[in-house]
Amino acid sequence: MSDHTDTLDGVIDETLREMTAGSPRQGVRVRVLARIDGASAPEPATPLWLGGRLRLAALQDPLAVLAIIGIVAALAVPQLLRRSQAPPRPAQQLATNPTSESRSPLVAAVGGSTAARSGAGTAVRPARSIVPSPKVETARARLNASTRDANRVSGGWSASPAVDADTEAADAIIAPLGDPIPITDRPIDITSLVITPIATRAIEIPLIEDRWPPKGPGQVQ
Amino acid sequence: MGLPAASNLCVSETELVERARDGDADAFGELVERYQAAVYRVARAALRSAAEADDVTQDAFVAAFQKLGEFRGEASFKTWLLAIAWNTARMQRRGAWRWLDRFRQSDTTDGALGPRPVPSQEDTLISRDLRARVRQMVLTLSPKYRDALLLATTDDLTMEEMGELLGIPAGTVKWRVHEGRRQLRAKLTRLGIRDE
């Protein structure tokens, strides 16, 4: 070991000694004994509520508190994001925006019945996604029922007993712009249907399958 | 109250502890007189500020008095007392502001320790500036090395006692002291102070 090395170690030692040297202020004994006299009777522990405990923990070990906050945030934020990005459930959508596409055009046209407002649109599927399912059948039946309700309320808007009685005949009301809908068991995408003046007049026609398009004044030939 | 303070000068540590445990404040006062410097040095090893070390010295003695009933005499009273002082100082060191200050200090020291032209090695080594820079380098050491290095410098504790304080074997304490010193030398070398 060279002299320089010895000197280098000497500087390090000297510095370390400086860092731990010194003595406490005068009167430590007096101050300590005074505090002991004052604290001879142990003070009852002050109950700390959650805020106090958190503050104490943050002062004593801020790293741990930050770590806990980070973990909680890491767990909660993705859940919140996922929830906010998920499409709303049909019931929510109907409640928040009853005029959206989830509501049937038919219901909109006839003013909507109580049954339709209370959930008839919940089973409606988007256009061009015709899938035979019980939901579609249910929606169809409800729409038919709502049509009957609307007829009653409007005081004979549809005067044909046959149409009121036969739920299948309600399909005749729902006429697309193009061809009439054949009365079959095939499920119908009710969201793609609209009510046209032609269709409403067609209510008066008992059997539209044989007489379509209807002939008459003001009708499309 | 116990005997006058003057009569405690030749009393053994064990007897003083017994009397202090029985409520003799003067006996405990004599223990304070005997060990306040050692307690202060241990507090200084954990803390940078002399004022904080002074406060911790008082806190440690008060805590020791309140815990005298737990002292079983397995270790010496001095070792037991220094362990209390070390733990009190560590709790003080963990405070939020000190925690932030640690980062602030390590940020500033890097800039302050930038390479500077060293006119003469001998002049530099004896200068106060160099000692200040060495002090800053000690503070930038990892706490496990810094604590071992500074505790060893106090000469108040054996390696085994330091191991009990730090919760590590005595051999690990020795290694940390050696490694801390090696890192300091490496930092000095990077500053341009090289062994030739």
Image (cartoon, coloured by chain):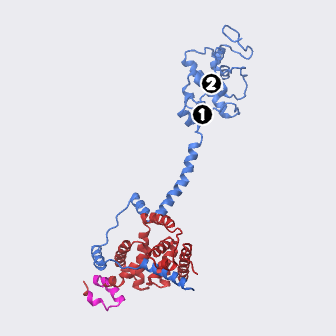
Image coordinates of residue A101 in percent, x first then y, are 60, 30
- Indicate left or right for A22 with A136 as reference: left
Q: Is residue A124 magenta?
A: no
Colour of the chain lettered B: red
Quadrant position of the N terminus of chain B in the picture: bottom left
Residue A78, how many percent across, how many down?
A: 57, 50
In the picture as drawn, the residue positioned furthest to the top comes out as A217
Residue B78: in sight, yes or no? Answer: yes
Quarter of the image for residue A165 reads top right
Residue at the disc numbered 1 = A122
What's the amino acid at mark 2? Answer: Asn
- Which circle marks residue A144 in the picture? 2
**Chain to which mark 2 belongs:** A
Res. A148 image quadrant: top right
Q: Which region shows up in magenta?
A: B5-29
Q: Residue A150 location in percent, x, y?
A: 57, 20
* Residue drawn at point x = 35 percent, y = 67 percent: A45
Q: Position of residue A88 (x, y in %)?
A: 58, 39
Indicate the colour of chain A. blue
| Discs 2, 1: same chain | yes
